Image (cartoon, grey):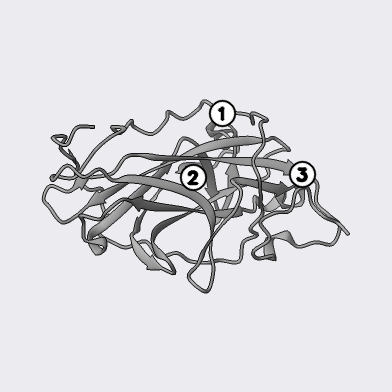
């Protein structure tokens, strides 16, 4: 991109001024290294809108955003992991989440005020939540949800906005993502993210669009193991039942 390129103008979504807090909930965190197997893809949701591959700030300095899979620990250190989550069949009845975090880092010399940066995340995969009588179930497709006779709502996995905040060794934006056990199928989805500078008006998208593939692989569970209550176990491949 030439130094004369200008930033893309952007209109903020509702609530974009709030800084997304990273809440470490009691989910299981299971990841491993990715492999060359192509998981199942589900074409029932259009990919997120395309963003320009190269954008820049007003003074021509480019800002690249990079996405990494991992976990922000209690010491404010983002521990990188593999981008594969292993799901367990015993969670199918509760549609339990096997969770992970995606961290976004803006590289290059900063020409922005970090407190006025928001990072928007989205993905190309949705879940369908059906609710009736105060209870809710998660379905793989909209059709599955509609056939249950409940009110159905689409939830885009990993969609949200984060502030750009300080951690040990730098700054980061974070979004929670997850996999579920869906009938033993393997699948994957692509996370995307870009940075928004809220200092000028209108607000500006001032980074490239970062992407990261999250792979979800189904495996049998070990007996008497509560995987939903285990923290920080990122590298089990396959489950170690010993």
Visible residue check, residue 15: no
Q: Is residue 209 above or below residue 113?
A: above
> Which residue appears at 21% of the width and 45% of the height?
61
Which comes sooner in the sequence, label 1 or label 3?
1
Q: Nearer the viewer, residue 35 or 124?
A: 35
Element carrying mark 1: loop
Query: How many discs appear?
Result: 3
- Tell me the number on the disc at residue 157: 2
Residue at the farthest right position: 242
Q: Nearer the viewer, residue 217 or 97?
A: 217
- Tell me the number on the disc at residue 42: 1
- Tell me the number on the disc at residue 219: 3
Q: Is residue 198 above or below residue 231?
A: above
> Which residue appears at 57% of the width and 49% of the height?
178
Residue 225 picture quarter: bottom right
Q: Residues within 10 Å of mark 3 (few under 14, many from 20)?
A: some
Q: Is residue 121 above or below residue 223?
A: above
Residue at the farthest top position: 43
Which comes sooner in the sequence, label 2 or label 1?
1
- As measured in the structure, the alpha-carbon distance from the residue carrying label 2 to the one carrying label 1 is 13 Å
Q: Give the side of residue 217 with respect to residue 122, left or right.
A: right
Q: Nearer the viewer, residue 120 or 144?
A: 120
* Position in image of residue 20 (x %, y %): 37, 61
- As measured in the structure, the alpha-carbon distance from the residue carrying label 2 to the one carrying label 3 is 21 Å
> Which residue appears at 24% of the width and 45% of the height?
206
Q: Where is the N terminus found, in terms of image quarters?
A: top left
């Amino acid at each position: 991109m030439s130094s004369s390129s200008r930033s893309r103008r952007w209109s903020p979504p509702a609530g974009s001024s709030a800084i997304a807090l990273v809440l470490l909930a009691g989910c299981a965190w299971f990841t491993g290294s990715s492999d060359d197997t192509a998981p199942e893809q589900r074409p029932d949701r259009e990919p997120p809108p395309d963003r320009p591959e190269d954008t820049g700030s007003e003074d021509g300095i480019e800002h690249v955003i990079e996405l990494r899979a991992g976990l922000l620990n209690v010491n404010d250190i983002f521990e990188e992991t593999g981008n594969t989550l292993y799901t367990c069949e015993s969670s199918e009845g509760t549609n339990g989440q096997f969770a992970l975090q995606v961290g976004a880092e803006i590289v290059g010399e900063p020409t922005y005020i970090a407190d006025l940066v928001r990072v928007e995340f989205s993905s190309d995969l949705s879940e369908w939540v059906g609710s009736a009588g105060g209870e809710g179930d998660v379905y793989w497709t909209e059709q599955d949800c509609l056939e249950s006779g409940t009110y159905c709502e689409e939830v885009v996995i990993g969609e949200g906005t984060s502030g750009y905040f300080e951690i040990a060794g730098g700054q980061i934006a974070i979004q929670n993502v997850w996999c579920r056990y869906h009938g033993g199928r393997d699948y994957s989805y692509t996370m995307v993210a870009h940075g928004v500078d809220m200092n000028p008006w209108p607000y500006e998208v001032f980074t490239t669009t970062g992407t990261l593939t999250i792979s979800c692989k189904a495996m049998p569970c070990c007996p008497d193991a509560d995987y939903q209550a285990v923290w920080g176990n990122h590298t089990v491949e396959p489950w170690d039942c010993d």
